[in-house]
Amino acid sequence: MWLFFIEAMMNSLEEPDPSSSLPQRLLAAAIVVAALYFGRELLIPLALATLLAFVLAPLTTRIRRLGVPRGIAVAAVVSITLGALLGSSVFIAGQIRELGRELPTYQSNIAQKFDRLREQLRAPGIFTEASRVIDAVESEIAETQVQMEARSANVRPPSRVEVVPTSPGAYETVTGWVARIGPPAALFAITLIYLVLLLLNPEDLRDRLVRLLGGSVHRATDALNDAGQRVSRYLTMQLAVNLSYAVPMAAALWLIGVPGALLWGLLSAVLRFIPYVGSLIGAVFPLLLAFAVDPGWSMVAWTLALILVLELISNNFVEPWLYGSSTGLSAISLIVAATFWTALWGPIGLVLSTPLTVCLLVIGRHLPQLAFLDVMLGSRPALELPNRMYQRLLTGNTADAMELAEESVAASSPRQFYEDVGIPLLRMAAVDHHSTEASAEHRHHIITGMSAVLDELRTRHSAERPQTPLEALCIGGRWTVDTLGAGMVAHALALDGVAVAAAPTPAGAVTAELIASLGAGGAKVFVLSYFSPQPEKHAQYFCRRLKRRWPESKVVLALWNVEGADLAAIPLADWCADAAVGSINTLVAEVAARLDRVSLLGWTAAPVGAKEPERVRALRDSGVLDESLRITFDSAARRAADIFDVPLAMVTLLDEQWQFIHGDSAKAGRLGPGAPERGVERSASLCGHVVADGAAIVVPDVQRDPRFAGNPALIEKAIRFYAGAPLRDAHGHVLGTLCLLDTQPRTLSLRDAKLLQSLADELMEPLRHPTRPDALPASPAGPAAAA
């Protein structure tokens, strides 16, 4: 409830006056923190019950699926939980009682060790004499001071009086026990009541939370689902990590000979739910017992070594492997959250700090008015790579900018770095050029820093120019940033073996000296780089001058700041240009087409798996190529297109050479009435990559992906977006895909990608049970699925 109280407070602060926004938000934050602190008696049980409900709700759902009424299912789950807690408590109490009976037998070992330590400390050393002199001086000073105070007061020193307490009566004893046991018992009882209520009516609670969140029902539902999944995944992974630590610890302590090995293993598993301090507390008990049991130090050494090894393995291998991005929280936010919740709610707040902070992160991710929580708490970078480099260049930190550029290039390629980082960075610089916030110093830092970065990349990733006439010339349109963009294009083309050069930006206009400097041959392709959002007049004039001088040459306009729809609407004939592009990969493909250099297109053919013959045999034996299944696959594709709101969805099936499509989306190569239609070759099919990898693939923008940007089949059909999920049979063979396509770039969230895979699995479910008589039943006839 406190989360929604925060959200309501933030909603109330959406005032039109920005000057009062910050003070009001700070006041609201102070009110919320005060409410969390003073309302902790109510909120702590509710938070504990909600956390337990995340764990027990799946078990309740499974029992209800067996036909058991909800009340009986909840009673059974709660009873099992209470029984497990009671059994664990009895076991722990029994182990502690047994260890308590054996502790007197270890007194001699403890006394002997302390005696040896005392003897070692009393042995003569370097500082022994100095310490003895200091002690003697201090005692003399103290004695003299006491004597002087006694003479001056001329009174006798006070006598020592000892107060002997009386033994408490029965009433006082019972009252003391109640005072100690009452608060934990009340907390347990209230938490249990909340837990039962949460499990009995979760749908009503969810509806009320959606209403409290307000705004979009879709957004509120996504926030609740995301929070539930993250918290459940975190608790599951935490349990797995704790067990992977506790089981080896109990076994190793038993081998070492430490008494109560099973108890310490169980205790370590429970205590590790407490962040940071739980593992330390769990390690203290076996170390102290090893110190008491063994007359020597070998058992202590082995126990300490065991704990250190387990901590290293758990912290550096097990936790990163199991946790991954289960919470989405940054490391510093976890520490700050632990401190904050511990200060508010004490030790229980420390236990609840991670789940509570996960809920805050999810709310900040889904509610725009609380988006700052996602920035503060999330593990995702606060700035995208182009923004990070831009910020480094603004501060004049060219070294960090070079380091970021090299990391990006090492992960992909120089061309992809220019596509994903270089062009967006210069686009920001062009937009800020005329801004009142951009000073001359800022512009100087951007230009000089980016020039240094490009020079460094050209040095480290050099390309020798072929001994051929000039094939392409890249020219900056007007400004210095245009020249930097032209330099990126020239380097990308040079790395692909093109005889290319870059020319400086004309000083405000196309000068006759620039035209004359190109010589009589000019170049086969001219690339004009513009970051201006409205380059019409200058680009037209430039193109006409170039065409007039070299009518056989081709002119490609790189309009980095023109939107996709406006780019497609440019009248190329009126501008005397042959093509207009907005990305590096598309530009390389255009230059390759003008030069008849297919090798420059840079697309990756679909690979072939090691078990391809077996997969193709399973495809032909499955019957999915039969024309009787045409209506079923058409209906599935149409359903996917409607759900994801895309203009094109298909069910594709791939053999060793071709991609076959069920539906009317491809008119060429029809094999027969109702049979799947033969499409592109498998090597040029994006679905071929899904079949080879055995996993779903999402390509937000085909032109920006070096694997597919130059694929001629995609260029011909103007495909910009692709998402495909594998169709698996009962033996795990990938027969084809259920894929989505669009002529515009778009994104697909992880949740939507999982939904696409579930639709593919649902389509293939009858094939995984071939004995069923309704395997792949035909749906009612309807329009084709594709468009």
Image (cartoon, rainbow, N blue to C red):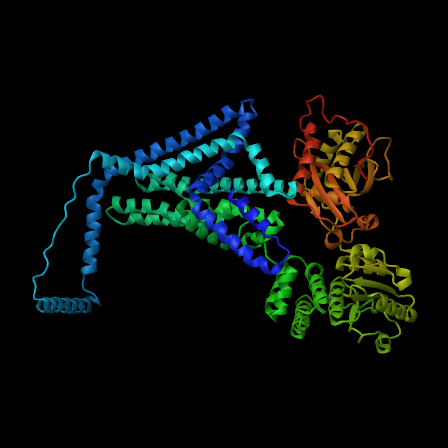
Res 203 visible = yes
Picture coordinates of residue 245 (x, y %)?
A: 43, 43
Q: Looking at the image, which is closer to me, 770 or 22?
A: 22
Picture coordinates of residue 485 (x, y %)?
A: 74, 66
Picture coordinates of residue 184 (x, y %)?
A: 36, 38
Q: Is residue 160 above or below residue 286?
A: below
Task: Quadrant for residue 98, please give it.
Answer: top left
Q: Looking at the image, which is closer to me, 639 or 344?
A: 344
Res 657 visible = no
The quarter of the image holding the C terminus is top right
Query: Which residue is pictured at 84% across the width and 30% down the height?
Result: 674
Query: Which residue is pictured at 53% across the width and 45% down the height?
Result: 5
Task: Quadrant for residue 513, please give it.
Answer: bottom right
Q: Is residue 774 above or below residue 424?
A: above
Q: Looking at the image, which is closer to me, 178 or 329?
A: 178
Picture coordinates of residue 203 (x, y %)?
A: 57, 32
Q: Is residue 702 above or below residue 543?
A: above
Left or right: residue 39 compared with residue 412:
left
